[in-house]
Amino acid sequence: MDKRKIKQLEAKLQGQRDLLLGMVERTEDYGREANRDISQDPADQASNSYTKELLFSQSTNERNILRLIEEALDRITEGSYGECVNCGQDIQAKRLEALPWARYCIKCQELQEQGSLVEEEV
């Protein structure tokens, strides 16, 4: 992959990181605000609890993607971006366009989703 394309993907990763950081921060702020109103009736409390659980779930997903983005930015710095972290083969450019934080080539991603890929702890 050429340097110009990597720079474009790096900018895309940084933009996505900034967007997710803002979303996670707003979710945390909303959760703190929801806890302050203790005079709610039971129906409001149940609704509030459900909303907080939904936001927590979304926040967890956002944090996972954020972690993958940070790892991808680290691989750019190290010079290993675009290589599968499992087998070392090149990740297809179209895959990186769609998911610039992709860690695996298609073959290894399928193995990972099937539970057949054993990742080494770093």
Image (tube, grey):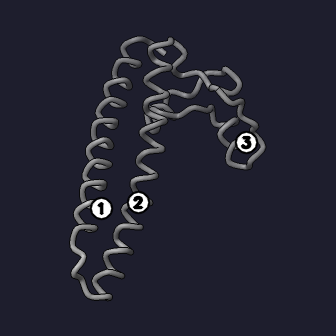
Q: Which residue corresponds to the image point at 37% horizontal and 31% vertical from the top-left?
A: 13
Nearest to the eye among marks 1 and 2: give it.
1
The secondary element bearing badge 1 is classed as: helix
Quadrant of the snapshot with the C terminus = top right
Q: Which residue corresponds to the image point at 24% horizontal and 76% vertical from the top-left?
A: 38
Which residue matches tag 3? Answer: 111
Q: Residues within 10 Å of mark 1 (few under 14, many from 20)?
A: some
Which residue matches tag 1? Answer: 31
Marks 2 and 1: in contact by CB < 8 Å?
Answer: yes
| Vertical order, 43 against 22 (above or below) | below
Nearest to the eye among marks 3 and 2: give it.
2
The secondary element bearing badge 3 is classed as: helix
Relative to the observer, which residue lies in front, 25 or 76? 25
Which residue matches tag 2? Answer: 56
Q: Which residue corresponds to the image point at 43% horizontal and 29% vertical from the top-left?
A: 70
* Three-letter residue code for mark 1: Gly
Q: Residues within 10 Å of mark 3 (few under 14, many from 20)?
A: few
Quarter where residue 86 is shown: top right
* Three-letter residue code for mark 2: Phe
The CA span between labels 1 and 3 is: 37 Å
Q: Is residue 49 left or right of residue 64?
A: left
